[in-house]
Each structure stands twice: as structure tokens, then as C-alpha cells.
Amino acid sequence: MKRLLLIGATLLVLGGCSSWHNSNIVDPADRNKVLARDKANCEKHAAQRVPIGAETDGAPVEPTTYEAQFSENYSQVSTFDKCMKARGWYKK
């Protein structure tokens, strides 16, 4: 749960200054539906690709440094952005 909140907060902070656009979708109602669906899929994909604090083989989570956490968060945001761009979205 913390991981999802962290991902959401990171995406809001980094994406707060711009919005996603897709020139292939003309109807605003369709655009909002497709955007919501694509965002959800890309968030799920980003969370699965870069697990934060995940346990491996039942071992306890190793303590991480701030730099390591930042690196993981950056990787998730980067994965999310790549996923959205692959679906035809761009920031404006």
C-alpha cells in the first residue's frame, strides 16, 4: 500500500506541471477514458518492473539509502513515461 502511495505521489509531483495529450484521440470524452485506462495500466507496469523494498525468498528487506530510494523512484517514473509514450501520449 505504501508503495502505491509513493508511486502516486511521485507521479503527481513530476506530472503536476504538465498534462498528457494524444493527438490520435479527437473526442474529449474518449480521451479521458483512454487516458485513465492507459495511466492505470502504465502505473501497474511500472510498479511490477521496479519493486520498492520487495522481499526476496523470504529474506527481510534490506535497509536502503536515500540515494537508492531515489534511484528506484526515478526508474519507476521513467518506466511509466516510456509506457505512456509507447501508447501515443506526450506531455504538453
Image (cartoon, rainbow, N blue to C red):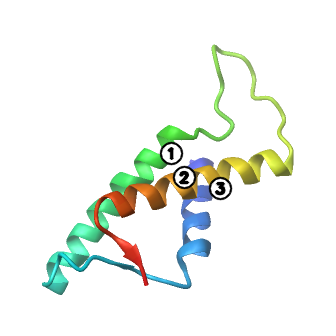
Which residue is label 2 attached to?
4
Q: Quadrant of residue 68?
A: top right
In 3D space, how far apart are the residues under numbered discs 2 and 1 (Cα atoms)? Answer: 8 Å
What is the spatial separation of the Cα atoms under label 1 and label 3, in whole angstroms? 12 Å
Label 2 or label 3, whichever lies nearer to me, is: 3
Residue 10 % position (x, y): 61, 65
Q: Mark 3 points at which residue?
A: 74
Disc 2: CA contacts within 10 A as few (<14), some (14-19) or many (>=20): few
Q: Which residue is drawn at 69% across and 37% down?
A: 53
Q: What residue type is labelled 3?
A: Tyr
Q: How many numbered marks have been drawn onto this rendered protein structure?
A: 3
Q: Which amino acid does label 2 sit on?
A: Leu
Residue contact at pointers 2 and 1, CB within 8 angstroms: yes
Q: Where is residue 1 in the image (x, y as percent from the top left)?
A: 56, 48
Does dot 1 land on a helix, a strand or a loop? helix
Q: Residues within 10 Å of mark 1 (few under 14, many from 20)?
A: many
User: Where is mark 1, residue-wise?
Assistant: 47
Q: Is residue 3 above or below residue 11?
A: above
Q: In this view, does 64 lie above or below 33?
A: above
Q: In this view, does 62 lie to the left or right of 21?
A: right
The image's mark for residue 23 is: none
Name the spot of residue 52 as percent of width and height, x first.
65, 41
Front tag of 2 and 1: 1
Image quadrant holding the C terminus, namely bottom left
Other residues around mark 3 within 10 Å, as few (<14) / some (14–19) / many (≥20): some
